[in-house]
Amino acid sequence: MAQWWAGVSETFARCFINEGRYKLLISGIGVTIKVSLLAIVLGMVIGFLIALCNLSKKKPLKIIGKVYTDVIRGTPSVTQLMIIYFVVFATINWAKWIIAAIAFGINSGAYVSEIIRAGILSIDRGQTEAGRSLGLTAKQTMMYIVIPQAVKNIFPAMGNEFITLIKETAIVGYVGLMDIQKAGDFIKSATYEAFMPLVGTAIIYFVLIKLLTIALTKYEAYLRKSEKR
């Protein structure tokens, strides 16, 4: 047992301590968080606009919304990332993580749009009619009556989208970003150890997502307080 533990300790030190390799993982955590946060913000903005297009009675807007969601949802996120990075932004000297976040934001926007659309449609039509009867415009009714109620319905799905987005960013290594997964791969290549680096990256992702889940659950409970009688 002592010999086994000594071997594990030696492997751990070689993978994470020697040559300061743990710093790669710490830096990777920062990259993953930055990309995910910017992507979810962009995804919500794009998703809201596309949801309004899909709900619009104007045919050109509905076509734009449908084409966007069909194309984005029908192609792999890694392909979209590489097109955005190597083609669309090939001549633009922006930070890699910003370009990656834009790619993931565009991808997330398609899924967020469907979440928002479903949330808006879940609100009873009588709420809209009540708002209009009070003299509110269609825009005011949507902004002040429908959307605030829809937020509570879409929040759990939005939380799941954020969690999914964090895990999807593990492919940013394709464009040379040193995120958590890429840092683990680098350690694996440098030490010729597969088990420890892979388990280490899995644990880091698990902890990040677990903390996020706890925070989202608490905030959802806060939003639901107003529904209690």
Image: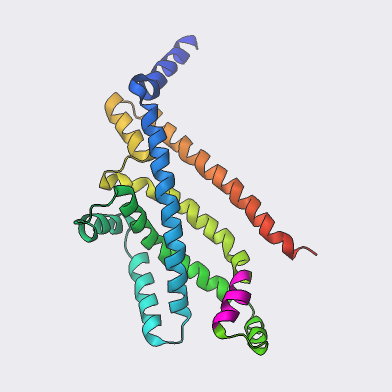
x and y, in percent, of residue 153 in the image: 61, 66
Q: Would you say 228 lies left or right of 44 here?
A: right
Q: Would you say 126 lies left or right of 178 here?
A: right
Name of the residue lying farthest toward the top: 2
Q: Is residue 186 magenta?
A: no
At 68% from the left and 55% from the top, the residue drawn is: 221
Q: Is residue 143 magenta?
A: yes
x and y, in percent, of residue 31 in the image: 38, 43
Q: Is residue 212 above or below residue 144?
A: above
At 42% from the left and 64% from the top, the residue drawn is: 109
Residue 198, can we see it?
no
Residue range in magenta is 139-148
User: Residue 43's quadrant in the figure?
Assistant: bottom left
Q: Would you say 113 lies left or right of 91 here?
A: right
Q: Nearer the viewer, residue 76 or 174?
A: 174
Which is the main secondary structure of the residues drawn in magenta? Answer: helix
**Total numbered circles:** 0
x and y, in percent, of residue 21 in the image: 35, 26
User: Residue 183's quadrant in the figure?
Assistant: top left
Name of the residue lying farthest toward the left: 91
x and y, in percent, of residue 162 in the image: 49, 54
User: Residue 133's quadrant in the figure?
Assistant: bottom right
Residue 197, can we see it?
yes
At 46% from the left and 83% from the top, the residue drawn is: 56
Tell me the colour scheme of the image: rainbow
Q: Nearer the viewer, residue 79 or 147?
A: 147
